[in-house]
Every structure is written in structure tokens, then in C-alpha cells.
Image (cartoon, helix red, strand yellow):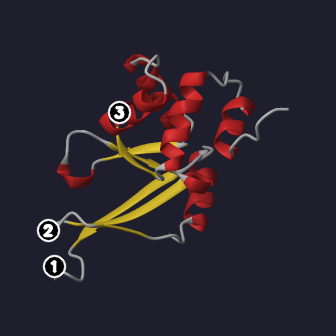
Amino acid sequence: MSEELSPRAQRLRDTGYKLTNARLTVLNVLESHGGHMTSTQVLDEVDKIDSEIGRASVFRALDLFTRLSIIRPTYIDSSTTPTYVMLPGGHHHHIICTNCNRVIEFEDCHLGQLETELERQLNVRLTGHLLEFYGLCDRCS
């Protein structure tokens, strides 16, 4: 009896990638935390689950997931270390307060028509996007 795969794990399989223990563990860590994790946090959580998974395997998995638009690195808190965010449905949206670094997520970006137009004009197939706005939140303005 096989375990039900998450849609992201199924996507890995469908695009021809093996479902290795390292990839599935990294994916499980990201999914269980909703993304929004630095590589250090991912490494720490993966180590708690399986200390045999090496750093290189974790970074290879993060790179693969980025190339497949499962996650995207973003630079919250003006850090040089990216925070990886999940791209449910191929997209993710933030408003980041430039004063207190509060991150406000929102769902509908209304970019469907723009995506269609960009694909048509530039002859590309878009697989996702990350939209970030910067400004002052209600607490800081």
C-alpha cells in the first residue's frame, strides 16, 4: 500500500524526477511549515527528521524546487539569505513593511490577464510568479 503523494511530490514524479528520501523530506519540511523558511531552518528541520541527509542534498533539493517553481527565494528582512516561500498554484504574494519587516500575504493578484498577454507577446510559457510590494503597514504608517 503506497502513501498518497502531495501535489508537489506528484509534480516531481510527473516531470521525471526520482522521489528520493532527501527530496521528499525537504519537501515535507517546507510544506509542513508553509514555506517561509531560510536554508538554515530547512537544514535544521531536515536534520531532526533524518540526520543522514547531507547539506548538499538539501541545497540540491532547494535548487530543483526553485527551478520547478515549487518554491521561490525572497529576501525578507533585507537579508542576504533568502527565505524560501511556497508557490501554491504557481504564485505567491507579499506586502513587506519597510519599517518593521512585517510580512502581509494576500491571495488574488489579478495578474492572469497580464500572464496571458506576456506569454503571447514574448512566446514563453510562464510557470509562476512572486509578487512583492514594499511600504509601511498600518502599525507603522
Q: Position of residue 130 (x, y in %)?
A: 44, 54
Residue at (54%, 66%) from the top-left corner?
Answer: 111
Q: What element carries label 2?
A: loop
Residue at (35%, 33%) from the top-left corner?
Answer: 44
Q: Quadrant of residue 20?
A: top right
The residue carrying mark 2 is 99
Q: What element carries label 3?
A: helix
Instruction: Tell me if residue 123 comes above or below residue 60 in the rendering.
Output: below
The span from disc 1 to disc 2 (Cα, nearest Å) is 7 Å
The span from disc 3 to disc 2 (Cα, nearest Å) is 29 Å
The residue carrying mark 3 is 44
Q: Mark 3 or mark 1, which is nearer to you?
A: 3
**In the picture provided, is 65 more to the left or to the right than 140?**
right
Q: Quadrant of residue 37?
A: top left
Query: Residue flagged by tag 1: what amino acid is it?
Result: Cys
Instruction: Tell me if residue 125 comes above or below residue 106 in the rendering.
Output: above
Quadrant of the rendering where the N terminus is positioned: top right
Query: Residue flagged by tag 2: what amino acid is it?
Result: Asn
Earlier residue among tags 3 and 1: 3
- Structural crowding at the residue carrying mark 1, measured as other residues with C-alpha within 10 Å and reported as few (<14), some (14–19) or many (≥20): few
- Structural crowding at the residue carrying mark 2, measured as other residues with C-alpha within 10 Å and reported as few (<14), some (14–19) or many (≥20): some
Q: Where is residue 4 in the image (x, y as percent from the top left)?
A: 76, 41
> On residue 140, which mark appears?
1
Query: Residue flagged by tag 3: what amino acid is it?
Result: Asp
